[in-house]
Amino acid sequence: MFDIQKVTKDFVQKLTETNAPQWRAYIQSIDEALSSVKIRTQRDARRVELARHNLIEIRRHLKRMDERVTTLEEQLQVLEEQGKAKKGKK
């Protein structure tokens, strides 16, 4: 039988096992690389500006995803506690 709680728990656990700060390091590295680019033309300046804007948007989305994962983890804990309480009553 398909156990949705176990699958969800395993999924969330795999998400949390990966280093969450790792994406922050990647973004910082990209930002530093963009800062070190020598801009010689207006075209290059626009490209770097667009890349920085996209990086800001990525940072925002990842922050929201982290918040959502945290919320889902909390909800999962509540569901697990409720499941254990129901099993204890039987």
Image: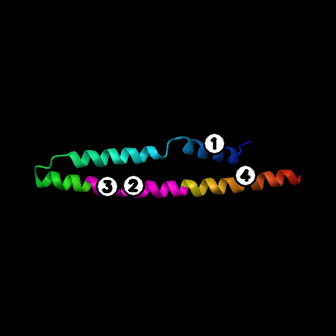
**Earlier residue among tags 1 and 3:** 1
Mark 1 or mark 4, earlier in chain: 1
Secondary-structure class at tag 3: helix
- Residue type at mark 2 is Arg
Query: Is label 1 in contact with label 4 (beta carbons under 8 Å)?
Result: no
Of pointers 4 and 3, the one earlier in the residue sequence: 3
Q: Earlier in the sequence, mark 1 or mark 2?
A: 1
Task: Name which quarter of the figure residue 71 lies in.
Answer: bottom right
How busy is the neighbourhood of tag 4: few (under 14 within 10 Å), some, or many (20 plus)?
some
Report the residue marked by disc 3.
54
Q: Amino acid at mark 4?
A: Glu
Q: Amino acid at mark 1?
A: Asp
Q: Is residue 66 magenta?
A: yes
* Mark 1 vs mark 3, CA separation in Å: 32 Å
Q: Which image quarter is the N terminus in?
A: top right
Sequence-wise, which precedes: disc 2 or disc 4? 2
Q: How many marks?
A: 4
Around disc 3, counting alpha carbons within 10 Å, would you say few (fewer than 14), some (14 to 19), or many (20 or more)? Answer: few
Query: Which span is picked out in magenta?
Result: 51-68
Tag nearer the camera, 2 or 3: 2
> Which residue in the structure is indicated by mark 2?
59
Q: Which residue is at 52% across, 41% downward?
A: 18
In the image, which is nearer the foreground, mark 1 or mark 2?
Answer: 2
Marks 1 and 3 close (CB-CB < 8 Å):
no
Q: In percent of the image, x 56 and y 41: which residue is there?
A: 17
Residue at the (88%, 54%) spot, across then down: 89
| Percent coordinates x, y for residue 40 in the rendering | 10, 49
